[in-house]
């Protein structure tokens, strides 16, 4: 691990700035349940059964009950060492921006200035009638919540299964990748598209790919360096190694 860590740090320093792609593995250490696996279950439902436009049309109150539960967890969560290490990497010029599949806002809470939210944010809602968006300071008390402007039904401002990611966010992610010297991928399985295509695009362009994950994933075949471990443990070590090389 020591040799791989040094190699990754050298790439980070020599090819800076890197673009960062993050997934659920980053926020899991802050107590935010992952979408898949046993901790993704709620009552008897799987997220795939609730995070869809069809489920919302069928039973908006049930979907909002699940999202309120998730919001309560997210609003209590705090950035962990992985979030803070990435924010410091940005401050040092090692990374340019974070493209995240997470909807919890913890990168911003850690001080990350450039964040592209591919899947939206659970801290916002938008009206299904007039399109008005609003930010939550706390989970809604009445379910399903209504738009303060037109009285229409509000929905979480997130991307559901079967919906495309916001075109502007994806275009920005591609532009940032083109400008970056490499790609740092942290805590994602790499199977959800279109985010999962970024490692392949980076490798095809000859850019180094550093993967940090607890196990090998769909990203690993494109990885120049694979660092096995929890993001909250590996990223601070990577930061310190890179900081030493910058000194």
Image (spheres, rainbow, N blue to C red):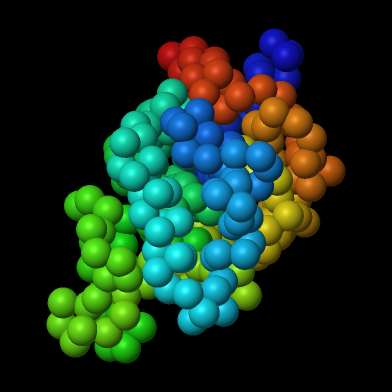
Quarter that holds the C terminus:
top left
Q: Write the residue at 61% across / 69% down.
A: 161
Residue nearest the observer in this picture, 132 or 216: 132
Using the image, determine if residue 27 lies above or below residue 53. Answer: above
The residue positioned farthest toward the front in the image shown? 44
Question: What count of labels does the image hold?
Answer: 0
Q: Can you give x and y, in whole percent of width and height, for residue 8 in the image?
A: 65, 26
Residue nearest the observer in this picture, 122 or 234: 122
Q: Write the residue at 63% across / 62% down.
A: 48
Q: Would residue 57 be seen by someone viewing this image from the given angle?
A: yes
**Left or right: 49 with respect to 133?**
right
Residue nearest the observer in this picture, 54 or 13: 54
Q: Can you give x and y, in whole percent of width and height, for residue 125 in the image?
A: 32, 68
Quarter that holds the N terminus:
top right
Using the image, determine if residue 219 lies above or below residue 152. Answer: above
Q: Would residue 13 be seen by someone viewing this image from the given angle?
A: no
Using the image, determine if residue 218 lies above or below residue 246. Answer: below
Q: Can you give x and y, in whole percent of width and height, for residue 163 in the image?
A: 57, 76
**Left or right: 137 with respect to 195?**
left
**Left or right: 202 with respect to 75?**
right
Q: Can you give x and y, in whole percent of width and height, for residue 20 in the image?
A: 54, 44
**Left or right: 219 with respect to 142?**
right
Q: Write the residue at 25% across / 59% down.
A: 140
Q: Write the residue at 75% across / 45% down.
A: 219
The residue positioned farthest toward the right in the image shown? 221
């Amino acid at each position: 691990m020591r040799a791989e860590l040094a190699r990754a740090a050298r790439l980070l320093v020599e090819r800076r700035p890197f673009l960062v792609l993050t997934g659920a593995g980053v926020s899991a250490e802050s107590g935010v349940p992952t979408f898949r696996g046993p901790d993704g279950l709620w009552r008897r439902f799987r997220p795939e059964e609730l995070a869809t436009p069809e489920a919302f049309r069928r039973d908006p109150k049930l979907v909002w009950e699940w999202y309120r539960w998730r919001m309560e967890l997210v609003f209590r969560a705090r950035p962990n060492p992985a979030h803070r290490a990435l924010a410091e990497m940005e401050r040092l010029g090692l990374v340019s921006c974070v493209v995240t599949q997470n909807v919890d806002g913890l990168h911003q809470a850690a001080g990350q200035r450039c964040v592209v939210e591919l899947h939206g944010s659970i801290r916002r809602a938008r009206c299904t009638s007039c399109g008005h968006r609003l930010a939550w300071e706390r989970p809604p008390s009445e379910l399903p919540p209504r738009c303060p402007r037109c009285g229409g039904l509000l929905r979480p401002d997130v991307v559901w299964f079967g919906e495309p990611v916001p075109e502007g966010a994806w275009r920005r992610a591609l532009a940032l990748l083109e400008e970056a010297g490499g790609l740092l991928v942290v805590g994602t399985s790499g199977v959800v598209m279109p985010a999962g295509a970024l490692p392949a695009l980076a490798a095809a362009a000859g850019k180094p790919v550093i993967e940090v994950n607890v196990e090998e994933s769909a990203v690993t075949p494109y990885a120049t360096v694979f660092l096995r471990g929890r993001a909250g443990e590996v990223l601070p070590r990577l930061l310190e190694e890179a900081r030493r090389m910058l000194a």
